Amino acid sequence: MYSVILTEFGIVVFKEEKLEKVFPFKDAVKDYISVKKKEAKLNDLVNYLGPLQRGISVSDESLMTLLKKNSIDAQMMEESELETIQSTKPQIIVDSGFAKNVPDALSKLREFAMGLSSSKVTEVSESPDLHIIQAINSLDEIDKIANGLSSRLREWYGLHFPELDNIIDSINGYSQIVLAGKRESLTKKVYEEAGFPDSKADMIALLASKSRGGDISDINLAIVQSIAKQILDFHDLRKKLEAHVELEMETVAPNLSAILGAAVGARILGKAGSLKKLASMPASTIQIIGAEKALFRSLKTGAQPPKHGLLFQHAMVHAAPRWQRGKIARAIAAKAVIAARVDVYGEGINKTLLEKLNVRVNEISKKYENPTEKDTRKPELFRSDSGESRRREGGESRRREGGESRRREGGDFRRREGSDSRREGGDFRRREGGESRRREGGESRRREGSDSRREGGESRRREGSDSRRENKNYRERTNSKSNKNKKRSKFERR
Amino acid sequence: MKEDNFEFFWINSDGEKKLATENLVIGNQVYNEKLITKKGTEYRLWDPFRSKLAAAIMNGLEIFPFKNKSTVLYLGVSTGTTVSHISDIVGPSGIIFGVEHASRVARDFLDRVASHRANIIPILQDARKPKEYFSVFGKVDVVYVDIAQPDQTNIAIENCKMYLKKDGYFFLVIKTRSIDVTKSPKRIVEEEIKRMEVYFEILQVIDLHPYDKDHAMVIAKFLK
């Protein structure tokens, strides 16, 4: 009877309870992992065990598989034997000559555990999907920062040239004008470089000549200009990040990015944690990722479950009419999870996935071209304790229905994660939005943007500039609240 | 709980008696906790808002099996806040096997705790596969489980079967929200306890309010 025992420092062979032969590892951590992964080449051991051929029992399953691959008939030890090995492990290590005595064995075991754990951490940290997640999160954070800074810039420079705010929507153009300096120093060249058409340039020039704004001191202007510079830098960085995420998604998860698009795919990847985790998720989870708040409310109160979370950002979903969005989101999620699995476990790009998805989406848009009665009627109230909480949330039960409301509900959660700045009405994001949405919602949203900006500015100003830094958190809160309320009423009016 | 029973201490700080342990590694802070030196001994304050074991002590824990020289299997060490205090308590001849699966928090754990404390053996493994643990040997005195999984009780029981001594102690943190959000916390705790009763004698159940919402700690004795 031969017992082959895998220890942390080498493989040990016992014959009838007596030490027979030791095969020490060269690099304990590396070799141990390669045995566990069933990749090790155990030539010495195989050569030794080969002629014996019978009565070989093994303490580890991966080791057994390895031996069987080398056509050695090995069997697993019995539970009781394994237990004995486990409880006398330090002694076995001493007996095999890996350590001088038991305390030495303990400290060696700890060293080994540290090494193995560290190498696992290193291995995980190297996976490219984690870098994509960091990149997409940076991108969303930059959106948030740049949007906040943009409204600040418009506020501050607005003291000097208030009329400019309403004519220039793009924060880039605005920043470029700010960089040129005071009203008086704005020339035709500045407008040209900022890429404005002549008509607009003339208008700005006209407004500049009879502006209602006050004078701005050089020191103040210098600071305002460095803010403008920052915004332009952020814009460049954002562009870089966007291209980077797209490229990385193409290489790491080509199928996923074909179905979802690079940005949405990366955001969903970020929520899942890693590509592997995403691949092992059910499609229904992917469908509502990002709508956790609404989902848990639905589980708790029995309210309608959310139709889509982050997937709302997908062009197909938000371009579709309200009553089709849930169905489309479901179809996309189902294909997305298959795509993720192909990316993890398969190879290359599977084109049929996208084709089939397109077929299905077309089918949905034909079959459900018109809203059914169920889609248009007001849902029943789902809360009996309506009073306080419902009023707080706007008191309109139809909010549960549409995409806009979803955006609003998911908002709190997503804002904390820093992944959605769309609602802030930011210039950065506006450009990203799908064609149709821009057409439908752009106009009103732009108006909203400036409204709430003004409102936000008001409350911020009241707080005084000295305490601004200390009150940062508070300010953000009040700010976003006022924005939110403002927008809600807009949506409802529309 | 008696005062100063040499496992943990009540130290005066900011006019209040606060929980603390004797620091095993002098001058070493783990989570920016306060270090207080009294009569030549350095103590680390133990924040019940950060550590559920401390919260359990604050809420009237009756049995404290973590002693000098104890061996402990700890599932779900996370960044190692609680483990560092247990490491203080079991001292240089005690052993803690710290199991954690998530590599992000394990990174912090290795950096801040495991590399400074010789009595901790870090094991980066899934607690669902207790057979795969490396560097673990013998049976332990206490199993402490804080893993926030829907099937955490079963995972814990499997681990106890393999590594817990007969009559050893078992600490299970139940985060009811991780098991099922739709059920009431009270019911979940009852159900989990029912599952445990096959193998354990339940000694105490502690609600961790106000330190942690919807969390409970179950202390039990292993019968098999």
Image (tube, rainbow, N blue to C red):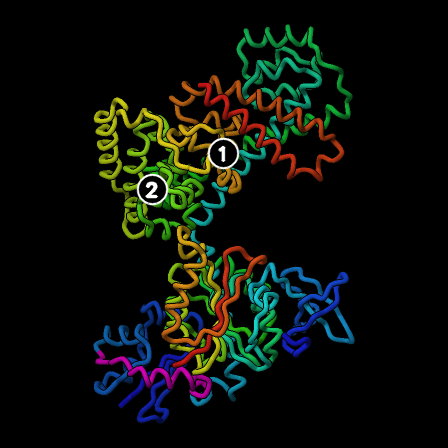
Work out whether residue A225 or residue A455 is closer to the camera in this orientation and state it: A455
Q: Is residue B143 visible?
A: no
Work out whether residue A77 or residue A40 is closer to the camera in this orientation and state it: A77
The number of discs equals 2
Q: Pointer 2 and pointer 1: residues touching (CB < 8 Å)?
A: no
Q: Disc 2 or 1, which lies upstream in sequence?
A: 2
Q: Is residue B9 left or right of residue A46?
A: right
Q: Is residue A388 visible?
A: yes
* Quadrant of the image containing the N terminus of chain B: bottom right
Which stretch appears magenta?
A72-93
Placement of A92 over or under A366, stated as above or below: below
Q: Is residue A6 left or right of residue A354?
A: right
Q: Amino acid at mark 2?
A: Leu
Residue marked by disc 2:
A256
Do the residues at discs 2 and 1 belong to one chain?
yes
Q: Amino acid at mark 1?
A: Gly
> Which of the numbered marks, if any, corresponds to residue B146?
none
Residue marked by disc 1:
A387
In the rendered image, residue B210, in percent from the top left (x then y), is placed at: 58, 57
In the rendered image, residue B15, in percent from the top left (x then y), is placed at: 77, 62
Magenta-span inclusion, residue A59: no
Work out whether residue A322 or residue A386 is closer to the camera in this orientation and state it: A386
In the rendered image, residue B167, in percent from the top left (x then y), is placed at: 45, 82
**SS of the residue under disc 2:** helix
Q: Chain of mark 1?
A: A
Q: CA distance from mark 2 to mark 1?
A: 44 Å
* Quadrant of the image containing the C terminus of chain B: bottom left
Q: Callout 2: 10 Å neighbours few (<14), some, many (20+)?
A: many
Placement of B149 over or under A437, stated as above or below: below
The answer to which quarter of the image holds residue A214 is top right
| Residue appearing at x 50%, y 23% in the figure | A489
